[in-house]
Amino acid sequence: MPRIVRLKVDFIIFIFMEILYHYTHHKALLGILKKGEIKLAKASAQNTKPIAWLSIDKVFERTALKTVRDPITKQTTNLTFDEQFEKLGLARIEVKHTKKIHTWAKLKHLANYRDLSFIHGLEEVGLECGAKPSDWYGSLTPITKNNFIKIEIFNGKKWVLYENENQLNL
């Protein structure tokens, strides 16, 4: 008769948390530091909630590139990574994961993005500029400085620790 043997196995579960970054430029970084929080971006569509945007892209979130308007011609231009570095500087804040931070897949529902064509439009624009919507995260509440892990600026070659305003291109 076969004998039943009961084995006790302990499982160790590793939860890998992606590193979250808020990408911005130097002037905006100073505003964040002064206010003590990453503010919510304006709502993208009617009847939607504003979002404090984050990304897991370790190099740079392409949707964080700014559009500038020429004061004389009134024409707008989307900056490239190099142009933004030269004109505005590049900065990022590493942020702790909290229960208030969600993936884009969940966030678009929490923020009331009901118009699927609008959602697809946002995602298409992101893809066109080299971003991946699967890298997008965000919060429906401002992200306060007690959730900041570190602040870095891009020096033209790599991300380095932010120490003071003298490093900024203002």
Image (cartoon, helix red, strand yellow):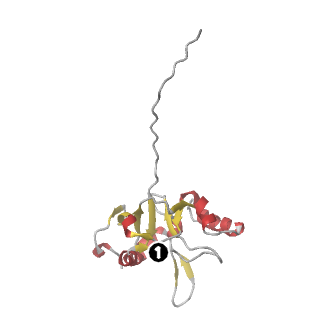
62 or 117: nearer the eye? 117
Q: Residue furthest top?
A: 1
Q: Pinpoint residue 90: horizontal percent, then vertical percent.
A: 41, 70
Residue 21 image position (x, y, % from top left): 44, 62
Is residue 55 rendered to the left or right of residue 43?
Answer: left
In which quadrant of the rendered view does residue 109 lie? bottom right
Image position, residue 10 (x, y; %)? 45, 32
Question: Viewer-proximal residue, 137 or 147?
Answer: 147
Looking at the image, the residue that sits furthest to the bottom is 72
For the image, the number of numbered tags is: 1
Compare residues 58 and 137 and report the one nearer the observer.
137
Residue at 52% x, 65% y is 138
Which quadrant, please, contains the C terminus?
bottom left
Check the image and report above or below for 168 versus 95: below
Q: What residue is drawn where x is 67% and y is 65%?
A: 120
Instruction: Describe residue 111's horizontal placement relative to residue 145 as left or right.
Output: right
Q: Dot 1, crowdedness within 10 Å: few (<14), some or many (≥20)?
A: some
Q: Is residue 105 above or below residue 75?
A: above
Q: Is residue 28 visible?
A: yes
Q: Quadrant of the N terminus?
A: top right
Residue at image position (40%, 75%) is 32
Tag 1 residue: 39
At numbered mark 1, what does the secondary structure look like: helix, strand or loop?
loop
Residue type highlighted by circle 1: Lys
Residue at left offset 55%, top offset 13%: 3
Visible in this render: residue 25? no
Check the image and report above or below for 14 versus 41: above
